[in-house]
Amino acid sequence: MLKDNFENILKEIPPNVELVVAAKSRTVKEIEEVISAGAKIIGENYVKEAGEKYALIGKKVEWHLIGHLQKNKVKDAVRIFDMIESLDSADLAAAINKECRKVQKIMPVLIEINSAAEWQKAGILPEDFNAFMEEILKLKAIKPMGLMTMGALLKNPQDMRPFFEKTRQIFEKAKKIFMLNDWKYLSMGMSDSYKVAIEEGANMVRIGTAIFGPR
Ligand SMILES: *Cc1c(COP(=O)(O)O)cnc(C)c1O
């Protein structure tokens, strides 16, 4: 059962780790069920789908965007989401900043790191990270709070460890270089890999399948 799955995962993760329920393709009824089991953060990949669910479920949970954001969806995204975990370009950062200024909102963001460039497309390459940060720190309506990574989606989660490790190193270095008060989230790990990700320092995990079953 959904509620039991959710509770079992909560029991397994340390108390400092935030659980983002990855809810793409799940119904409002399923999401309401995990919310009554105690879920606090819902992660969505698509703005339109999130908007439809948000209209029915509302602000009793936090909404995180975890999928790639297209620029023509930024206006709606800014209205719905409490955090954008998938900031992956300077153009997108500027577009989010612009929409946030219009509605006088400051958007918490995580920078998506392309930690497995060989397999993965989206995200900032590790070698470009510092320059990217300097660029987006000029934008006052977005608030960088940490990093997100997917890593390579490999069968054996142990093989994903190097990507998580690399992302944690960037996270720690950024803490020293940029000294931001709110720099605190490291979002890594999904159903198959969250244990390894937590061992490598994740304090936010995004889990769908292990809660809802296969899509
Ligand atoms: C779907 C998704 C997840 C969750 O994946 P599961 O394997 O279902 O746990 C996490 N992060 C992102 C970005 C996703 O799109």
Image: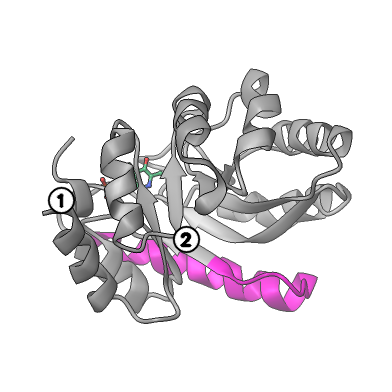
- From the viewer's side, name the closer residue of 118 and 142: 142
**Marks 2 and 1 in Cβ contact (< 8 Å):** no
Name the quarter where the N terminus is drawn: bottom left
Hey, which quadrant is residue 29 in on the image? top left
Please report the residue visible at 23 percent of the width from the left and 76 percent of the height from the top.
12
Hey, which quadrant is residue 35 in on the image? bottom left
- Residue 125 in view of the camera: no
Using residue 115 as the reference point, say whether residue 21 is left or right of it. Answer: left
Callout 1 environment at 10 Å: few (<14), some (14 to 19), or many (20+)? few
- Residue 168 in view of the camera: yes
Callout 2 environment at 10 Å: few (<14), some (14 to 19), or many (20+)? many
Q: Could you say where residue 70 lies in the image, as x and y percent from the top left?
A: 59, 24
Q: Could you say where residue 167 lies in the image, as x and y percent from the top left?
A: 49, 63
Name the quarter where the C terminus is drawn: top left
**Magenta stretch bounds:** 159-185
Hey, which quadrant is residue 176 in on the image? bottom right
Q: Could you say where residue 156 lies in the image, as x and y percent from the top left?
A: 15, 58
Please report the residue visible at 71 percent of the width from the left and 26 percent of the height from the top.
75
Using residue 59 as the reference point, say whether residue 25 is left or right of it. Answer: left
**Which of the two marks, 2 or 1, is nearer to us in this view?**
2
Confirm whether the magenta stretch covers residue 119.
no
User: What residue would you read off at disc 2?
Assistant: 187
Up-down: is 37 above or below 30? Answer: below
Please report the residue visible at 15 percent of the width from the left and 63 percent of the height from the top.
4
Q: Which mark is residue 155?
A: 1
